[in-house]
Image (tube, rainbow, N blue to C red):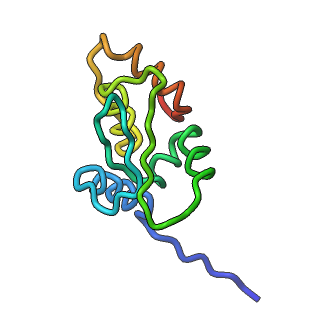
Amino acid sequence: MEHIRIQAISHFDNMRGMFEEFYNSKTMVDVVLVVEGKHYPAHRLVLSIGSDYFRRVFTDLQDDDTTPTIIITDDISCKDIESVIEFLYRGQVILQQEHVASFRRAADKLGIKGFH
């Protein structure tokens, strides 16, 4: 029996576009991160794709009808988590030079993949 491949030409571009839309609109949120008392709505799938830390946390959660709140207390600032979230959704982030070191520390603590 012969197999035929059917492939979307721009599948990953479409996904990247949806991540950007979710980032901007905050729709279909299924987790809230809390850093220094500030709430950051997000999506478990997006965070899990780019972070070993978040994948472990979400794997350990019991599925139910509530949106989990994850409190991050490991010396990660609001500025750092905002930059990490932007990086995970957009695949890039623009930082001021003096913020690069703290971003790298936060990204390392959260097991963020794919940055140089």
Answer with left or right where residue 99 lies relative to residue 48.
left
Q: Quadrant of residue 77?
A: top left
Picture quadrant of residue 97: top left
Along the horizontal axis of the image, is 25 left or right of 91? left
Q: Estimate the x, y position of residue 53 in percent, counting from the top left.
A: 57, 38
Q: Residue at x 45, y 27 (%)?
A: 73
Return the x and y of residue 48 as percentages of the image width and height.
52, 48
**Image position, residue 58 (x, y; %):** 56, 50
Picture layout, residue 109 above or below residue 14: above
Q: Nearer the viewer, residue 85 or 74?
A: 74
In the rendered structure, the answer to whether residue 110 lies left or right of residue 43 reads right
State the residue at coordinates (51%, 71%). Answer: 7
Furthest toward the right, the residue is 1
Q: Residue at x 63, y 81 (%)?
A: 4
Q: Quadrant of residue 88?
A: top left
State the residue lying farthest toward the left: 25
Q: Is residue 58 above or below residue 78?
A: below
Relative to 87, residue 69 above or below: below
Q: Nearer the viewer, residue 110 or 91?
A: 110
Q: Residue furthest bottom?
A: 1
At a point 32% along the width and 42% down the height, the residue shown is: 40
Is 63 located above or below residue 53 in the figure?
Answer: below
| Residue 95 x/y as whole percent | 29, 22
